[in-house]
């Protein structure tokens, strides 16, 4: 059994790592990481805009955004992927690579979830910060930019990392539309071997486990550090007054 | 076809929900039990199921473990809708990790003073748990439990990857036959959204009923 694992890793590690890269599209673990990093990098500004829209006094902005967030939260990611797979080529009229489709889907989906985190971060700061900033002569946008968002986003860093983890897990769904990621590579390996599915998929699970576990570990240590810094040197021994942000991420 | 899909989605959902809840309670019991070995086992279980994508877990079950089973058992399963059974097992085991963590953090939030006070009033350990700790702990655990119940419902769509004939599968099939992609997807989406909102509403109702402020008034 152990021998099987070693042979599979020895024979296919390059395929699992970068897919068929020099001869074909980039794939494997590298693609999974690139896809999730890009998705989270793009979802971040999108989520701030969405959160601001949801907190806006303008109904025209607030209502559609609230509806969008509820729809994204109530519909499986798989359904969303199918939608994008169908709609994006229709609108652009071009042959869009599945990587891009998956990227767009993830930005929408994680943007909606992150926007809830951002919104909670802004709301938890309290009205006083905004009032004080306005009293000091900031406009709404200036107060947001210089006073509210820096504080809210700093508190958000741990939930950003755990959103990154769930994005990595979400990229596996790209399998359905043949995005060449790690899961896809593993199923290619499985199709070539045919006889050892358990070994192949266990290796796949272990790789994901190591990846996500280490990122979660980083998130937790950053969270502790932030809690300490927010408590300040004098209050370091008191329990942190600001309740840690509830991480609103989607499990997959 | 659509109705069959919805039916299957619900079979998978309810089956895995029950499996997950039962397992979660068992895991929690194992964790708080005086057995030394319980804690690391549960921690490893939760860690595995939270850090490996659900899709990969399902694939491991259906493509991997299915083939390792003894011939008689796998034949029997193949004759009894193995896809759906493995979807229930995979989703249920995965969700149990989340449910048990929700329950645990709910119970932890109650605080040791409650237990001491209950025992000072003459409750034993078991009856203090039953009448003082559990009601408060479960109430605190309700919001994350509801959230995770909704995401379990959405995750039931993952069963398409191992070929269980649930709603997303039905949607894809109908699309392949009729080519009316837009309409079919819209129906599928609205159905998912509808039931997700219903689950959220049921959850909100239960949370409201459990609210002590409201019960004191009634």
Image: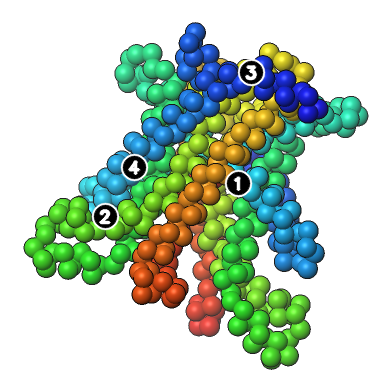
Q: Which mark is residue A12?
A: 3
Dots 4 and 2: beta carbons under 8 Å? no
The numbered mark 2 sits on a residue in which chain? A
- Do marks 1 and 4 both belong to one polypeptide chain? no
Q: Residue B39 at what x, y percent from top left?
A: 72, 59
- Do marks 1 and 2 both belong to one polypeptide chain? no
- Asked if residue B218 lies left or right of residue A152, the reply is right
Badge 4 marks a residue whose secondary structure is helix
Nearer mark to the viewer, of 1 and 2:
2
Residue at image point 21% right, 59% down: A147
Residue named by callout 1: B50
Quadrant including the C terminus of chain A: top right
Closer to the chain start, of discs 3 and 2, is 3
Nearer mark to the viewer, of 3 and 2:
3
The residues bearing labels 1 and 3 have C-alpha atoms spaced at a distance of 26 Å
The residues bearing labels 1 and 4 have C-alpha atoms spaced at a distance of 23 Å
Q: Badge 3: few (under 14), some or many (20 or more) residues near its Cα, within 10 Å? A: some
Nearer mark to the viewer, of 4 and 2:
2
Q: Is residue A12 above or below residue B162?
A: above
Badge 1 marks a residue whose secondary structure is helix
The numbered mark 4 sits on a residue in which chain? A
B215 or A215: nearer the viewer: A215
Q: Which mark is residue A150?
A: 2
Dots 1 and 2: beta carbons under 8 Å? no
Q: Which mark is residue A44?
A: 4
Residue most extreme to the front: A233
The residues bearing labels 4 and 2 have C-alpha atoms spaced at a distance of 14 Å
- Do marks 1 and 3 both belong to one polypeptide chain? no
Quadrant including the N terminus of chain A: top right
The residues bearing labels 3 and 4 have C-alpha atoms spaced at a distance of 35 Å
The residues bearing labels 1 and 2 have C-alpha atoms spaced at a distance of 30 Å
């Amino acid at each position: 059994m152990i021998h099987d694992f070693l042979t599979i890793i020895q024979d296919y590690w390059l395929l699992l790592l970068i897919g068929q890269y020099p001869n074909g599209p980039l794939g494997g673990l590298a693609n999974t990481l690139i896809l999730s990093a890009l998705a989270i990098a793009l979802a971040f500004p999108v989520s701030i805009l969405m959160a601001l829209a949801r907190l806006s006094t303008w109904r025209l902005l607030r209502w559609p955004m609230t509806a969008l967030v509820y729809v994204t939260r109530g519909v499986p990611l798989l359904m969303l992927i199918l939608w994008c797979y169908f709609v994006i080529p229709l609108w652009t009229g071009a042959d869009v690579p599945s990587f891009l489709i998956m990227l767009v889907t993830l930005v929408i989906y994680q943007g909606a979830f992150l926007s809830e985190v951002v919104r909670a971060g802004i709301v938890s700061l309290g009205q006083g910060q905004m009032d004080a900033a306005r009293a000091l002569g900031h406009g709404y946008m200036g107060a947001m930019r210089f006073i509210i968002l820096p504080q809210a986003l700093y508190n958000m860093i741990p939930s950003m990392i755990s959103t990154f983890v769930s994005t990595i897990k979400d990229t596996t769904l790209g399998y359905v539309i043949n995005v060449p990621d790690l899961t896809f590579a593993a199923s290619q390996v499985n199709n070539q071997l045919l006889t050892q599915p358990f070994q192949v998929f266990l290796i796949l699970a272990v790789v994901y486990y190591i990846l996500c576990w280490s990122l979660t570990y980083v998130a937790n240590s950053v969270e502790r550090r932030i809690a300490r810094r927010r408590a300040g040197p004098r209050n370091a021994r008191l329990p942190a007054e600001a309740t840690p942000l509830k991480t609103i991420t989607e499990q997959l | 076809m659509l109705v069959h899909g919805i039916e299957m989605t619900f079979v998978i959902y309810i089956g895995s929900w029950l499996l997950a809840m039962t397992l979660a309670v068992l895991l929690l019991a194992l964790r708080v039990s005086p057995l030394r070995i319980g804690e690391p086992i549960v921690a490893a279980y939760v860690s595995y199921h939270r850090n490996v994508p659900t899709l990969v877990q399902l694939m491991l079950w259906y493509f991997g473990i299915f083939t390792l089973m003894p011939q008689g058992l796998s034949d029997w399963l193949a004759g009894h809708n193995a896809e759906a059974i493995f979807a229930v097992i995979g989703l249920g085991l995965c969700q149990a990790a989340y449910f048990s963590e929700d329950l645990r953090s709910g119970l932890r939030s109650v605080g040791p003073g409650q237990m001491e006070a209950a025992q000072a009033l003459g409750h034993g350990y078991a009856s203090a748990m039953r009448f003082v700790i559990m009601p408060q702990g479960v109430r605190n655990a309700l919001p994350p439990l509801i959230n995770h119940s909704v995401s379990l419902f959405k995750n039931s769509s993952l069963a398409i990857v191992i070929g269980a004939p649930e709603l997303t599968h039905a949607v894809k099939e109908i699309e392949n036959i009729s080519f009316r992609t837009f309409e079919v997807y819209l129906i599928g989406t609205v159905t998912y959204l509808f039931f997700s909102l219903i689950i959220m509403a049921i959850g909100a109702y239960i949370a409201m009923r459990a609210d002590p402020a409201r019960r004191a008034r009634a």
